[in-house]
Amino acid sequence: MSRRPGDRRPRREDRYPTDRHLPTEADINVHDTIDEKWAVKEYLGKTIEEIETRLCTSHAIDVTEELSGIGLKAFCFYITALVRYLKSDSSIGDSGVIDGFCGMVEWRLRNAREIKKCWPTLLDATDFVIEHIEKYDLIPIVYGHLPARLAAIQQRLRSLLNLSG
């Protein structure tokens, strides 16, 4: 299908997935890595709700690792499931997921411009976690460093979004 001159709609391959259009295999597996190939098996055809259910019924920290290694468009789509989990009662006492969240966001911020579309979502999640840190029952000797990491992530995201405070 050819595009008409002046057509400003993005081509399908340039669009981000939505609730009506789930991430494609190409959205998940961009670089053909082992992690991306495995993620295709776990994520292809799955809705945000299905991934959120998986977060609630398995080890959420595993999902943070998986989200670190999937394609950008799929990451920006599925991060919503993780944020919903972090805000839910299902995450009470899940200190491991906060460690995984920090690692995932730190990894993704190495190429911050690539995930620009996700900055507000990641900042919202970071703000929530900082505000409700006690709900995750962080063991100081194991996870005592997480509040400082979260503060650094928050500061970086605020800086990227040109927010003060």
Image: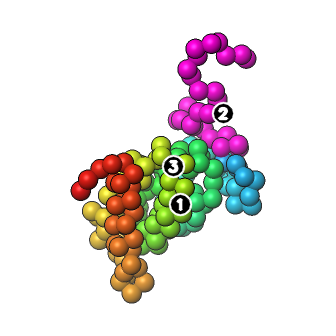
Give the image location of residue 165, x and y in percent.
24, 56
60 to the left or right of 136: right
Q: Which numbered marker is on residue 113?
A: 3
Task: Read off the residue under disc 1.
Answer: 110
Please tell me which of labels 1 and 2 falls first in the chain.
2
Q: Which amino acid type corresponds to the residue marked 1 in the rendered image?
A: Arg
125 to the left or right of 48: left
Q: Is residue 152 magenta?
A: no
Q: What element carries label 2?
A: helix
First to last magenta residue range: 1-27
The image quadrant of residue 2 is top right
Residue 71 or residue 161, whichever sits in front? 161
Frontmost of labels 3 and 2 is 3
Q: Does the magenta stretch include residue 17?
A: yes
Q: Which amino acid type corresponds to the residue marked 3 in the rendered image?
A: Arg
Numbered label tally:
3
Task: Read off the residue under disc 2.
Answer: 13
Whether residue 87 appears in this view of the structure is no
Q: Is mark 1 on a helix, strand or loop?
A: helix
Give the image location of residue 153, x and y in percent.
39, 63
The image quadrant of residue 66 is bottom right
Q: In this view, does 141 lie above or below 63?
A: below
